[in-house]
Amino acid sequence: MSAPQTTVDAKLVDQLEHRLARAIGQTVERWNLIEEGDRIMVGISGGKDSYTLLHMLLRMQRIAPVRFEVLPFHLDQRQPGFPTEKVREYLESVGIPYLIHSVDTYSIVIDKLRPEQTTCALCSRLRRGIMYNQAVELGCTKIALGHHRDDSIETLLLNLFYSGQLKAMPAKLRSDDRRNVVIRPMITVPESLIIEFSEAMSFPTVPCTFCSTQPNHKRARLKTLLDGLEAENPNVRGNMLAALGKVVPSHLLDAKLLGGDSVTVSAEEFDEGLIL
């Protein structure tokens, strides 16, 4: 349970917590993210998302009909100036066992990339590999990450615009080597709600500045694009999330989805412009 904060507005926290719990509970139930006896490693970056995820999983642990363990895990990547001790102090205040694992991936990223290259892809790949290995060594059955709705739809656009792939972030994913299961309990939660909750809780956030301060940061540009679209239509992000759950394979161009067969459409569909 999180340590009490003197600046917390209890009524506001209760309201926000209720909204988060409802969205997370529906996601956990729909995709069967947490099962009896799970030992869940929770990735803690020090940012608003991971603190919110940890808080909500501990809340769920107290009331859920299934028993599961929660193990906060922070990877210290030896980034100069990153206040790891601040993360440690918060995890100490939570009052449950945690692990801070230190590996110098920062130097590897700096050594491998040219100055103009963005660090995100390599940095996240190294971090993911270390977490996967640690989860196996620690006997964890799931790895919970704090990705939210906005992360998923921004990833969709990143893949669409820059990689030529139609791919986002699933709520549940088994790693390629089949050793790990990654879950994202907050994948339907708007980032704005997490920001509001984190501020209401006065979480001691220490967001990473390694990637976000780089020039030509594509994810930041997409946030700006989505903000602009949402100024015209407030439902843009919600509609994109809904679209990820309403895929129509017959109307895409991946032959593997069609088994090599042609697609038959009705006159109504054609007339309505659904097939161009």
Image (cartoon, rainbow, N blue to C red):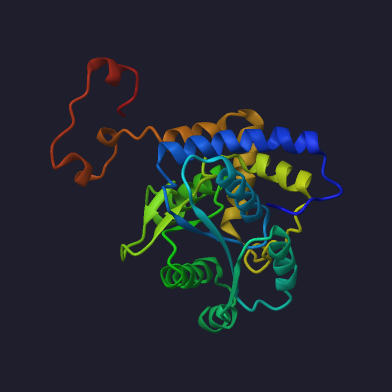
Name the spot of residue 257 as percent of width and height, x first: 22, 42
- In this orientation, which residue lies closer to the viewer: 60 or 159? 60
- At horizontal 55% and vertical 49% (from top left) the residue drawn is 151
Residue 143 left/right relative to 83: left
Give residue 62's quadrant in the image: top right
Give residue 63's quadrant in the image: top right
Name the spot of residue 116 as percent of width and height, x first: 58, 73
Name the spot of residue 158 as percent of width and height, x first: 48, 52
Residue at the extreme right of the image, as rendered: 6
Residue 5 left/right relative to 193: right
Examine the rendering and report whether any part of residue 79 can be seen. Answer: yes
- In this orientation, which residue lies closer to the viewer: 131 or 160? 131
- At horizontal 67% and vertical 62% (from top left) the residue drawn is 46
**The C terminus - image quarter:** top left
- At horizontal 67% and vertical 58% (from top left) the residue drawn is 47
Residue at the extreme top of the image, as rendered: 268
- In this orientation, which residue lies closer to the viewer: 160 or 91? 91
Residue 49 left/right relative to 265: right
- At horizontal 34% and vertical 64% (from top left) the residue drawn is 179
Q: How many marks?
A: 0
7 w.r.t. 98: above or below: above
- In this orientation, which residue lies closer to the viewer: 248 or 30? 30
Examine the rendering and report whether any part of residue 164 can be seen. Answer: no
36 w.r.t. 276: above or below: below
Name the spot of residue 109 as percent of width and height, x first: 54, 78
132 w.r.t. 38: above or below: below
